[in-house]
Image: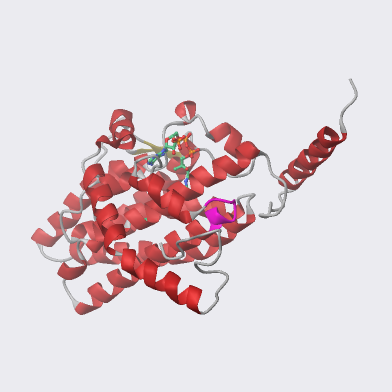
Amino acid sequence: MQQTQPEQHEQELEAEFERLVADDQRIEPRDWMPEGYRKTLIRQIAQHAHSEIIGMQPEGNWLTRAPSLQRKAILLAKVQDEAGHGLYLYSAAETLGVDRAELLDKLHQGKQKYSSIFNYPSLGWADMGAIGWLVDGAAIVNQIPITRCSYGPYARAMVRICKEESFHQRQGFDILYTLSHGTEAQHQMAQDAVNRWWWPSVMMFGPPDDDSPNSAQSMKWGIKRFSNDELRRRFIDMTVPQAEVLGLSLPDPELVWDEENERYAHGPIDWDELYENIKGNGPCNAERIEHRVRAHEQGGWVREAANAYAAKHGDQAGATSGQSQERVA
Ligand code: BYC
């Protein structure tokens, strides 16, 4: 059967897309892309952006209770970085033709996800150390490969984000090191926080490979470069020696060096805990969304003022653009 001209054109565009991906070049916003690729990116980038802004909550909880002015200033800078990461990522998602206001509505209505890790409570100051060391440590392992993602705006956003995450991880390590080498009570605080954040951090990488419906296609498209299990393994291998330097143990008696495979073997992961969390039944899911919706409503006047200012000054990138009614997330 003979092809119509539009069909032939579509095939050429698809071949060009596949060539760019195979050559490890970047797809840019105006390039043709398959609809599934666009949807997958919007899903992942939106979840990533939501994780950054929801991730401000467990630490925001401790800003007023930091033990010194210096610790407070550092934590404040870290939480502000996270807001910034959210903004880069919402901007990256907007290059795919969605509106950030629509993404935020989906987050608020529970129609889009954010990382499971932020549904755990931060119960003490040492949790700031454990979040920095383990959660940001896991984030770095997951995000460095995304600097090579096939979609240009996402990959470029990740370069700066990863640099900032390194500082975040380092500050967490420093908090834990100080506590671990302080009084016996401080050492116990650090150990307790690590005990509570270890398994959730291991789970952050997502379900095991044989239960990860999106991985195969995302890897073919160069959105993901490594599987969930591979990144999890790298995180564990990187973290165990750091725990030794901290003088803290990890809560897994089966964590031993496996000589033959040159990696750490670990105990069983409680996948039911992850699936329940993702379904909305983790310890803090409801609290996180309630807080987020309240903050959004209370910030409404800021968005109105920014839009009014942009309209007054004829700023095409502001409220006057049909693209986004809401420039301030
Ligand atoms: N939590 O097929 P799979 C940060 C979902 S923030 C919740 O493997 P995929 C920081 C998954 O979405 C860093 N949901 O999916 C901020 C999928 O559901 P849908 C956050 C999860 O996408 C502040 C389903 O399970 N990082 O560092 O191929 C302070 C099946 O999974 C989770 C990112 O967002 C989870 N843990 O792989 C401190 C990184 N895992 O969408 C630190 C970017 C899986 O089909 N994202 N699900 O309904 C990714 O790399 C990938 O999306 C994932 C999942 C590896 C997370």
Q: Is residue 128 left or right of residue 312?
A: left
**Quadrant occupied by the C terminus:** bottom left
Regarding residue 84, the answer to whether it shows in the image is yes
Quarter location, residue 220: top right
Regarding residue 129, the answer to whether it shows in the image is no
Q: Which residue is more in the foreground, 239 or 31?
A: 31
Q: Is residue 289 left or right of residue 187?
A: right
Residue 214 position within the rendered picture, expressed as x and y whole percent measured from the top left: 52, 33
At horizontal 56% and vertical 64% (from top left) the residue drawn is 321
Which segment is the magenta one? 92-98
**Quadrant occupied by the N terminus:** top right
Please determine whether, in this image, residue 225 is positioned above or below residue 178.
above
Residue 102 position within the rendered picture, expressed as x and y whole percent measured from the top left: 45, 50
Q: Is residue 10 left or right of residue 29?
A: right
Residue 298 position within the rendered picture, expressed as x and y whole percent measured from the top left: 26, 63
Q: Quadrant of ligand 1?
A: top left
Residue 118 position within the rendered picture, expressed as x and y whole percent measured from the top left: 30, 49
Q: Which residue is more in the foreground, 57 or 169?
A: 57
At horizontal 44% and vertical 47% (from top left) the residue drawn is 47
At horizontal 49% and vertical 53% (from top left) the residue drawn is 143
Whether the magenta-drawn stretch holds residue 94 is answered as yes
Please determine whether, in this image, residue 247 is positioned above or below residue 6.
below
Whether the magenta-drawn stretch holds residue 244 is answered as no
At horizontal 33% and vertical 54% (from top left) the residue drawn is 54
